């Protein structure tokens, strides 16, 4: 059975996000998501605040991180709780490989913070985020070309920093994902593709509707 996961979500642990973890847990299912990957900037601290598995409401929660380097940002999934920040991309990606994890090039063609393409040639990147909820249409289009040329799997990610953005650019998995190991295997096998958000999104925060101009769903 296919599953929809949002692979790129920032909680308020990220200095740039005001998305409360409780709001993610409460609203993800109603956005059509089967699971959420928490990917705070250089931090897996969300793991201290929840159970890293299926929640009582059926939502799968996996904690990864978005690792910043001067050669681009990477969504990492694996045993990286103690990975120190500030490594250069090749050494960090080599560590990911040694640990049997996965590195996804995050918004690789974003004008600000692009990913250096030669890292792909070195075989250090496992998948490409080709549908990022905060990218322009053109930045996503370039990322799609980039993934195609590199013969790498494509994924979507909302890059949510607010509740309005949660789930607007999910990834469809063509095999069951019920834990981190399943996610790593599915990404490495390329058993996934970017999916469109299920709309209309029921956007309510603190009992109030979220304003209409925040409802825009990014389209490729
Ligand atoms: Zn951020
Ligand atoms: Zn991000």
Image (tube, rainbow, N blue to C red):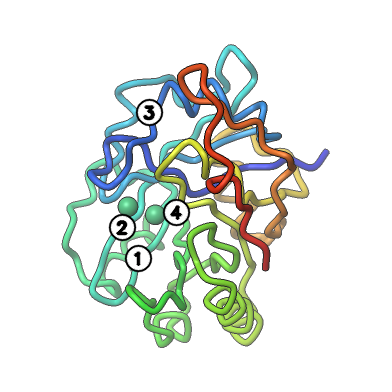
Residue tagged 1: 73
For the C terminus, the image quarter is bottom right
Q: Is residue 178 above or below residue 66?
A: above
Upstream in sequence: badge 2 or badge 3: 3
Q: Is mark 4 within 8 Å of ligand 2?
A: no
What is the x, y in percent for residue 86?
A: 16, 62
Q: Which residue is mark 4?
A: 101
Q: Is mark 1 within 8 Å of ligand 2?
A: yes
**Label of residue 67 in the image:** 2
Q: Decide which of 95, 161 is in the foreground and name it.
A: 161
Which residue corresponds to the image point at 52% horizontal and 71% vertical from the top-left? 136
Q: Are marks 1 and 2 in contact (CB under 8 Å)?
A: yes
Expressed as whole percent of the image width and height from the top left, the position of residue 62 reads 48, 35
State how far apart marks 2 and 4 are (Cα).
Answer: 13 Å
Between the C-alphas of marks 1 and 2, the distance is 6 Å
The image quarter in which residue 5 lies: top right
In the image, residue 131 sits, relative to residue 72, either above or below, namely above
| Of the two numbered discs 1 and 3 in the rendering, the one whose residue sits closer to the viewer | 3
Q: Which is nearer the N-term, disc 4 or disc 1?
A: 1
Q: Which comes sooner in the sequence, label 2 or label 4?
A: 2
Front position among marks 2 and 4: 2
Neighbourhood count class around disc 2 (C-alpha, 10 Å): few under 14, some 14–19, many 20 upward: many
């Amino acid at each position: 059975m296919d599953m929809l996961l949002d692979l790129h979500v920032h909680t308020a642990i990220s200095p740039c996000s005001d998305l409360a973890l409780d709001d993610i847990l409460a609203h993800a299912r109603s956005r059509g998501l089967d699971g959420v990957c928490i990917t705070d900037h250089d931090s897996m601290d969300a793991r201290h605040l929840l159970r890293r598995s299926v929640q009582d409401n059926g939502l799968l929660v996996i904690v990864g991180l978005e690792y910043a380097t001067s050669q681009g940002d990477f969504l990492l999934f694996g045993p990286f709780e103690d990975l120190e920040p500030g490594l250069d991309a090749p050494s960090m990606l080599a560590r990911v490989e040694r640990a049997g994890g996965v590195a996804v090039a995050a918004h690789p063609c974003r004008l600000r913070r692009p990913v250096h393409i030669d890292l792909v040639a070195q075989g250090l990147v496992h998948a490409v985020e080709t549908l990022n909820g905060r990218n322009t249409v053109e930045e996503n289009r370039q990322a799609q070309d980039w993934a195609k040329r590199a013969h790498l799997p494509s994924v979507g990610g909302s890059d949510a920093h607010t509740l309005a953005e949660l789930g607007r650019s999910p990834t469809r998995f063509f095999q069951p994902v019920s834990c981190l190991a399943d996610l790593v295997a599915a990404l490495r096998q390329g058993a996934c593709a970017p999916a469109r958000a299920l709309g209309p999104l029921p956007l309510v925060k603190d009992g109030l509707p979220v304003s209409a101009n925040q409802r825009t769903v990014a389209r490729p």
